[in-house]
């Protein structure tokens, strides 16, 4: 768990009475709390009513590790300091918490419904999670698509935040990840989307097949990567055979594990780009992401000559949570 | 371990002195032993010089479970009865054992070389594995292909056996399995081949990704399977997205786990058939296999109107080992 006050004076004992966010020196008293609760991680922000961030905190207690009864304790463990300080200053009304992500999945705290697209990224209605009377936890709905069948939880909030930051933006958003998503946005609505298993496929192949002998868990070979994307793009149907070829090349020609890892990644991404061509060819595209994975997709699309905009995914998630909060006021 | 004498009198104490395969009542004394040693299983046949099978035995001590020093003990454990009986009757020359399969891999008993195609399925030369002086274990070479890089170990022996049973046969052989192989045979030679990771992909996806929540480990839905093969064939590039769709359909529409399992299988097989089209479209094709997996591939190809011949893979392996034995005489 980490806790990072966002202002230099956060630990100063002389923070004066004009600081509306605090009741005692050092204590953080939010008006509400924003929560992004995914499969792997939990992030929370102590917020003022005007959308200012007072502090943020995170833990690895993602939805994937928790049973139903463990959600409330995991949240209280992370934000307990904020809720304790607040109960000293004000009593009566519960502290509002707005949450998005897999916390609303069937295996989550409580199942939040899916809103069918086309629709705005933040449809009306939050699902109230069961908790003690001092908290009022509302979960943002996911989005669903009937044909091809598809679902999202959490990404809709990033889209809402991105649109709040970029009003009137039309085009395709790419969100890399375990399950990369292409999301078509037009006139403030999510028109359609497309999720693939590409990231999880990479993990399953490099960890649980014969390729684990050929692929390293670390390291990267940029040249091998770029050479391979076009290859995956041009013959996407040959994926399963090319995967075995990686093994054969490591046996016959001593293909280095770093190069094999980059080749595996580019094969999967190139194959995915081939079938998602309609989402990026001649489209306005913005990548919402960060880190190595975002750089990888950016390089792959860059090599196809796609002029890519980029935006910060975490900032977008927070902006989306703020937009959801504002609508309840 | 199982041991199955192939003749009704095998356990009869009155087997007479005319039975050249035996020295004492009930004992089996082979002239040589045929061994098919794959990643998962070990099979052995007690053989007469003329190619008659005296007995067979099998264990699950496949190459994947053994370190280098464990191969000889695993073999002796399986065929000890045969070698013990023989040493009573004849002494001097070691007992010949001919083996094929992953036993000759880099992680096997000893690495046997690859012969580059095009070449006959059984190129000259066996690799002698280190063992006690009473045994002479020779391992059949694998085959390799340089572009696309590909390798096989064990399948070449099945091809040799199939050709021994079907002299002059030309066409494409399909060997389903963890790593399904298409093998082009012409004028008694292996001209080229193509391995895919399809079977292992199925196992990794259904066991180590989010699909494990949607796919059962047992059961089958034939209708879902046949409907899906054509689908995978027509848009093979969309595999990674269709995989996520399976998850979404189980969430949104309650797709049954048996149907999801069949859909996953047909998507992978259909995708693979799409990229292997040159191997079966307008070709003479024979499927070398058995069991559920062979039925699945047969149904998939049958639905494309491919007139499929079939042959027994185990019989082909044994015939190939016999062919290798004959050449050493």
Image: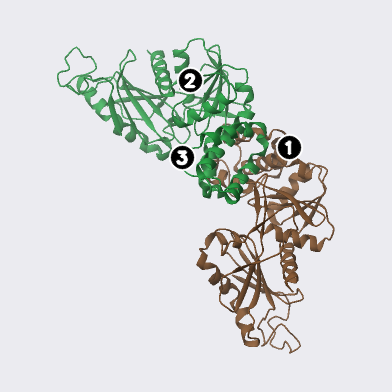
Chain colours: A brown, B green
Give me the C-alpha separation between circle 1 and circle 3.
39 Å
The quarter in which the N terminus of chain A is drawn is bottom right
Q: Considering depth in this image, is A156 or B165 the residue closer to the camera? A: A156
Q: Position of residue B160 (x, y in %)?
A: 47, 17
Q: Considering depth in this image, is B66 or A280 the residue closer to the camera? A: A280
Q: Chain of mark 2?
A: B
> Up-down: is B34 above or below A22?
above
Q: Name the element at disc 2.
A: strand
Q: Position of residue A212 (x, y in %)?
A: 54, 43
Foreground mark, 1 or 3, reads: 3
Q: What residue do we see at 52% from left, 63% from top?
A: A66
Give me the C-alpha separation between circle 2 and circle 3.
24 Å
Q: What residue do we see at 23% from left, 14% from top?
A: B20
**Badge 3 density bin: few <14, some 14–19, many ≥20, Cα 10 Å:** few
Q: Position of residue A43 (x, y in %)?
A: 64, 67
Per the rendering, the mark at residue B219 is 3
- Residue indicated by mark 1: A230
Q: Name the element at disc 3.
A: loop
Q: Considering depth in this image, is B87 or B80 the residue closer to the camera? A: B80
**Badge 1 density bin: few <14, some 14–19, many ≥20, Cα 10 Å:** many
Q: Considering depth in this image, is B133 or A288 the residue closer to the camera? A: A288
Give me the C-alpha separation between circle 1 and circle 2.
38 Å
Name, please, the residue furthest toward the left: B14
Q: Chain of mark 3?
A: B
Q: Is residue A186 left or right of residue B307?
A: right
Foreground mark, 2 or 3, reads: 3
- Residue indicated by mark 2: B310
Q: Are marks 1 and 3 on the same chain?
A: no
Q: Is residue A224 left or right of residue B228?
A: right
């Amino acid at each position: 768990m980490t806790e990072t006050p966002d202002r230099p004076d956060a630990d100063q004992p002389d923070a004066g009475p004009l600081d509306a966010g605090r009741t005692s020196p050092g204590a953080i008293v939010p008006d509400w709390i924003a929560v992004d609760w995914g499969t792997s991680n939990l992030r929370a922000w102590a917020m003022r009513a005007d959308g200012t961030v007072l502090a943020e905190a995170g833990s690895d207690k993602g939805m994937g590790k928790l049973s139903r009864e463990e959600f409330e304790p995991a949240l209280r463990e992370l934000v307990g300091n904020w809720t304790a300080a607040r109960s000293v200053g004000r009593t009566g009304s519960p502290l509002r918490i707005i949450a998005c992500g897999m916390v609303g999945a069937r295996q989550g705290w409580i199942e939040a419904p899916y809103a069918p697209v086309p629709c705005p990224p933040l449809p009306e209605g939050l699902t109230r999670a069961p908790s003690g009377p001092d908290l009022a936890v509302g979960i943002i709905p996911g989005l669903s698509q009937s044909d091809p069948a598809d679902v999202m939880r959490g990404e809709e909030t990033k889209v809402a935040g991105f649109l709040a930051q970029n009003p009137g933006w039309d085009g395709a958003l790419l969100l890399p990840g375990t399950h990369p998503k292409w999301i078509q946005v037009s006139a403030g609505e999510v028109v359609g989307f497309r999720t693939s298993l590409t990231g999880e496929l990479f993990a399953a192949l490099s960890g649980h097949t014969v390729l684990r002998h050929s692929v390293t868990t670390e390291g990267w070979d940029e040249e091998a990567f770029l050479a391979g994307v076009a290859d995956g793009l041009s013959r996407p149907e040959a994926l399963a055979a090319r995967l075995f070829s990686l093994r054969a090349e490591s046996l016959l020609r001593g293909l280095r594990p770093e190069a094999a890892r980059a080749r595996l990644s580019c094969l999967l991404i190139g194959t995915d780009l081939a079938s998602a061509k309609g989402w990026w060819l001649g489209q306005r595209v913005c990548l919402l992401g960060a880190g190595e994975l975002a750089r990888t997709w950016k390089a792959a699309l860059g090599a196809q000559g796609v002029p890519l905009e980029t935006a910060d995914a975490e900032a977008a998630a927070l902006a989306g949570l703020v937009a959801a909060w504002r609508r309840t006021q």
